[in-house]
Amino acid sequence: MTTTATTPAGARPRAAIAAKTLRTDRWWLAPLLTVSLLVLWVAYATVRAFMQKWYFVSDYHYLTPFYSPCVSKGCTAEAAEFGRFLPDWPIIPFAAVTLPFLLLFRLTCYYYRRAYYRSFWMSPPACAVPDGHRTYSGETRFPLIFQNAHRYFFYAAVLISIINTWDAIRAFHSPQGFGFGLGNLVLLVNVILLWAYTVSCHSCRHIVGGRLKHFSKHPLRYRAWGFVSKLNAKHMQLAWTTLGTLMVTDAYVMAVSANWISDLRFIH
């Protein structure tokens, strides 16, 4: 027995619309901008990761986050505070120990999933715009099932943030002694925002306050959960901001290391 949809008495039949969407605004602008900015950033980061030069300023101990920790045998000895044990091959980045985890942390981030699902995969590109694919299986099949490993990449990101913090602190103590320059400020702002982005992660929010039945019995965790929740509301902004600060920090260290500019020193 088959049933057919009928129009209620007194109601007009639904219009047959051939257009994919009735939206007349520039809904395509947001996904296009997302694609452009992400491609630009990935291209810059890839070139810099494999450039293997202009990553360290020995006079002030500035180390770009794209090369931290510098563990290749090709690293400058002063920059390799955690040892040099990777082979010095052009196809292996100097910071190959951490870069894959940072990439996976960003790639599986809940916000970035939304960003590249909509922009690169058109799934869907915008509200009231049809999906670019006929079928959708969610994140239950290969390779998207690995998105569920985001919480584990979060732990790695915390360790890497600690290393970046050490780099920022270490930069205040150059071979000439304590000093403070514009590069220190750039490194410090970058690491603070990296911590804000990492802590605002949805996985961090669950780790801090998840699986609790009564917040009243865990006041410290409740306060921490409230703090992380406020940051979590800014997760999208922090995701983009930290991409910008990473690029600015690397570009500044590269410019000083290549002697294109001189570091502005406040305390020598």
Image (spheres, rainbow, N blue to C red):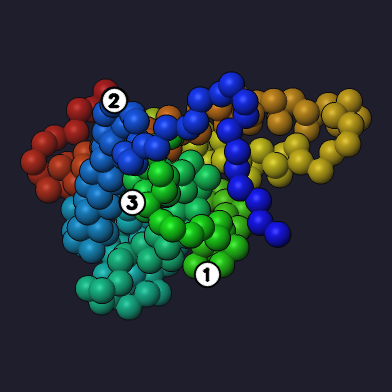
Q: Amino acid at mark 2?
A: Asp
| Residue at x 23%, y 43% (from the top left corner) | 36
Q: CA distance from mark 3 to mark 1?
A: 18 Å
Residue at mark 1: 142
Q: Identify the image quadrant of residue 252.
A: top left
When asked about the image quadrant of residue 228, the answer is: top right
Quadrant holding the N terminus: bottom right
> Splitting the image into 4 quarters, where does residue 250 fall?
top left
Q: Nearer the viewer, residue 22 or 42?
A: 22
Q: Is residue 58 above or below residue 202?
A: below
The CA distance from mark 3 to mark 2 is 20 Å
Question: Closer to the N terminus: mark 1 or mark 2?
Answer: 2
The secondary structure type at the circle numbered 2 is: loop
| Label 1 Cα crowd, 10 Å radius (few <14 / some 14-19 / many 20+) | few
Kind of residue indicated by mark 3: Phe
Task: Identify residue for label 2.
Answer: 25
In the rendering, which numbered label is found on residue 198? Answer: none
Determine which of the numbered discs, if any, sits on residue 120 in the image.
Answer: 3
Mark 3–mark 2 CB contact (< 8 Å) = no
Q: Is residue 76 above or below residue 239?
A: below
Q: Residue at x 49, y 31 (%)?
A: 13
Helix, strand or loop at mark 3: loop
Q: In which quadrant of the rendered image does the C terminus lie?
A: top left
Q: Are marks 1 and 2 in contact (CB under 8 Å)?
A: no
Q: Amino acid at mark 1?
A: Phe
Q: Is residue 134 visible?
A: yes
97 with respect to 119 (left or right): right
Please name whichever residue, 118 or 42, is drawn nearer the observer in this view of the structure.
118
Q: If you read the primary sequence from the N terminus, does the residue marked by circle 3 or circle 1 appear first?
A: 3
